[in-house]
Amino acid sequence: MTARGLAACQVSASYDRQRVLDGVDLHIAPGETVGLRGPSGSGKSTLARLLALLHAPDAGHVSVDGTPVTGIRHQVPVAVRTRVAILFQSPRAATDPRLSLADVIAEPLRAVGTPEERVQARTAELAAAVGLTADLLTRRPHAVSDGQLQRACLARSLVHEPGYLLCDEATAMLDASTQAHVAAVVKDYQRRHDAGVLVISHDAALLGRWADRVVGLP
Amino acid sequence: MTATVLARVRRLPRPRPGRVGVIVAGTVLAATVLACLLAPVLWPLDQSAVDLARTRLAPSPAHPAGTDDLGRDVAHRSLYGLRVSLLVGVVAALVAAVIGGAVGALAGTLGGWVDRALMRLVDTIAALPHLLLGIFIVAMLRPSLGAVMLSIGLTHWLSTARIVRSELLSLRHRPFVDAAVSGGAGRVRVLTRHLLPHVLPRLALATTLMIPHAVWHETALSFLGLGLPPHLASLGNMINDGRASLLTGAWWASLTPGLVLIVVTLALATLTARWRDRLDPRVRAELQL
């Protein structure tokens, strides 16, 4: 039904028999920015996890570039998994505390066996794009601020040049200038790669500024 | 007023926690291990020798820890007892760590019916008294050092399996693991790069804390006649032998092996606690301040 784009088709999801999503449709076209808002517990993050192929829907399916995806997590081929990147709300929870920021960014490349020189070059390029200095790259997550860590997470989410980026309240914990910088980096990436972006927030003003259209969850 | 005092107190340099303790514990443990390794060369002992003319002598320069009811030097035998006990403790703890680690890792990463089946197995074994189970295992084999190690190892992996499994379960759905999966990491890479490194310190800690427990377990088996032959010195054999002497006032026969056990256990626990702290990057940052 959908030629291109990332789509959730009539998806339902629940945690321990508690239904959080019931027959939801969402379509993100390439190059488009979709805003998703809704009160706490309305299933915004769950929808993002479904679209990121991390959580199995009870009913319905997710399709990537028009192809329905069966299975989740490791069951999904790497090429499909890396088409969709997700940026979480808490960078602290989303980074392995043992890795330096440079390793955090480089990890997805190493995971798919990229040659080390290519890894170094790409890491440096992305670190520069998100505004991380060489000194910060050697530090571990506990030694940097939330804003700096979220920049590293953003760089990590872009390493595989995903076609779709899901920002799950990704700027909620950041100060205004970092927030603006993260949004600028995402927009720049989106323009150059014609990527589809989902912005989840309960900040109506932010969605108004950033998104092409806003979808609400009840 | 109080606020300024408090502020001043907070500004005082924080002492590095346990620094002296770590040095003392490290020295004690190093000296102990060295003494145990060199004992057969420097201070050979005839395990079956008795000297009935010198029974229950109080501590003196000739016998620093006195002699027991068969006239054997308590200090000398404590050293040999520690050798055996440490060997049993370390090997049994390693056996438990390997079995428990493997079962816990399988249950924690595969989940589903594998997890349920393995954990019910753990529950079933845990429902049996483990000393009884240990006796059963030793009884099937011939009482020997190897049988004791195996029997303790085979009955003490349950808590290790539970620790490893629960750590993996709590880690498995953390966002950083989701991010790794989403970034293309395979099952093996997620396990070896993101999960196990976080579990290993806990596994190592559990293993090290198992050593003193295994030493005590060896004591119990020896007491029941299923451990080491009675003439061989082990801390357990010696403490039990000394109980009879206690009533006649010869307190030293049990005291020295008991003290040796306590001191070595404390030294081990201190070092493991420090090690665990060092492996946690956040605590490590504080230690370096």
Image: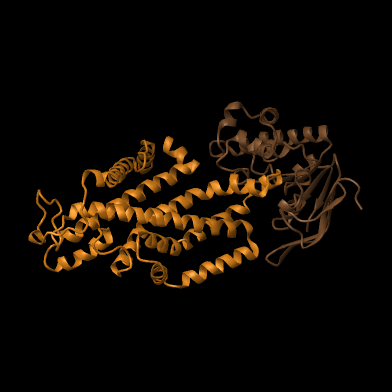
Chain colours: A brown, B orange
User: Which is nearer the eye, A63 or A211?
Assistant: A63
User: Which is nearer the eye, A14 or B142?
Assistant: B142
User: Which is nearer the eye, B80 or B158?
Assistant: B80
Q: Quadrant of residue A34?
A: top right
Question: In which quadrant of the rendered image does the N terminus of chain B lie?
Answer: top left
**Residue B259 on image: x %, y %:** 23, 55
Q: Is residue B259 left or right of residue B54?
A: right
* Residue shown at 47% from the left, 43% from the top: B279
Query: Does any portion of residue A175 appear in the rendered image?
Result: no
Q: Is residue B121 left or right of residue B185?
A: left
* Residue shown at 54% from the left, 55% from the top: B167
Q: Is residue A188 left or right of residue A124?
A: right
In the rendered view, tell whether residue A189 sits above or below residue B31.
above
In the rendered view, tell whether residue B95 sits above or below residue A156.
below
**Residue A58 on image: x %, y %:** 77, 63
Question: In which quadrant of the rendered image does the C terminus of chain B lie?
Answer: top left
Count of numbered badges drawn on the protein: 0
Q: Residue furthest left?
A: B53
**Residue A186 on image: x %, y %:** 75, 36
Q: Is residue B208 left or right of residue B119?
A: left
Query: Does any portion of residue B107 appear in the rendered image?
Result: yes
* Residue shown at 58% from the left, 52% from the top: B171
Q: Quadrant of residue A94?
A: top right
**Residue B194 on image: x %, y %:** 59, 46
Q: Quadrant of residue B213?
A: bottom left
User: Which is nearer the eye, B255 or A16?
Assistant: B255
